[in-house]
Amino acid sequence: MAIPFVVLEIDFLDAKDFNGAFVVIFYKRTGGVTGGVSELFKIIKENPGLRANILAEKINRPPGTIEKWLRKLKKEREIDYKGSSKTGGYFIS
């Protein structure tokens, strides 16, 4: 029987011995919310007019995360949404 597994992008790992059981712990470093928002801002600056779904594809994040970051940038008046709800996009303020 095949054992399913998931391949993760990892930055480093740690191996520990707990009472004879070998455990491997994987760590992935992320930029956190601030890093992600900065990355999103950079993408909008380089590609003005993109919609949320395209931004999500470009930086490989879930659409819900992108929309949360977009709200944060709009609240801070860093970006604006211009155009209609169907054809508009995000631009640097």
Image (cartoon, helix red, strand yellow):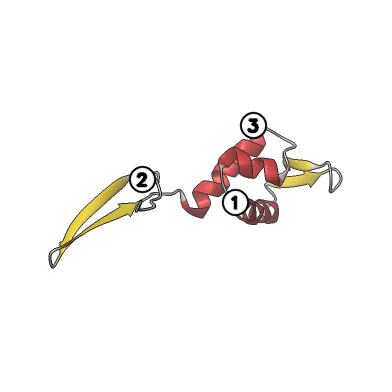
For discs 3 and 2, the disc positioned in front in the rendered view: 2
Q: Quadrant of residue 79?
A: top right
Residue marked by disc 1: 62
Amino acid type at image mark 1 = Pro
Pointer 3 or 1: first along the chain: 3
Residue marked by disc 3: 46
Residue 60 lies left or right of residue 52; in this view the side is left
Where is 7 relative to 64, above or below?
above
* Residue at position x 23%, y 52% in the image: 14
| Residues at discs 2 and 1 in contact (Cβ within 8 Å) | no
Pointer 3 or 2: first along the chain: 2
- Helix, strand, or loop for circle 2? loop
Query: Foreground residue, 9 or 3?
Result: 3
* Residue at position x 65%, y 35% in the image: 45
Q: Gap in Å between the C-alphas at discs 3 and 1?
A: 20 Å
Residue 67 lies left or right of residue 19; in this view the side is right
Crowding at mark 3 (Cα within 10 Å: few <14, some 14-19, many 20+): few
Query: Foreground residue, 76 or 49?
Result: 49
The x, y position of residue 1, in whole percent, is 34, 53
Amino acid type at image mark 2 = Ile
Crowding at mark 2 (Cα within 10 Å: few <14, some 14-19, many 20+): few
Amino acid type at image mark 3 = Glu
* Residue at position x 83%, y 41% in the image: 87
Outermost residue, left side: 20
Outermost residue, bottom side: 19
- Helix, strand, or loop for circle 3? helix
Q: Gap in Å between the C-alphas at discs 2 and 1?
A: 19 Å
Q: Quadrant of the C terminus?
A: top right
Residue marked by disc 2: 10
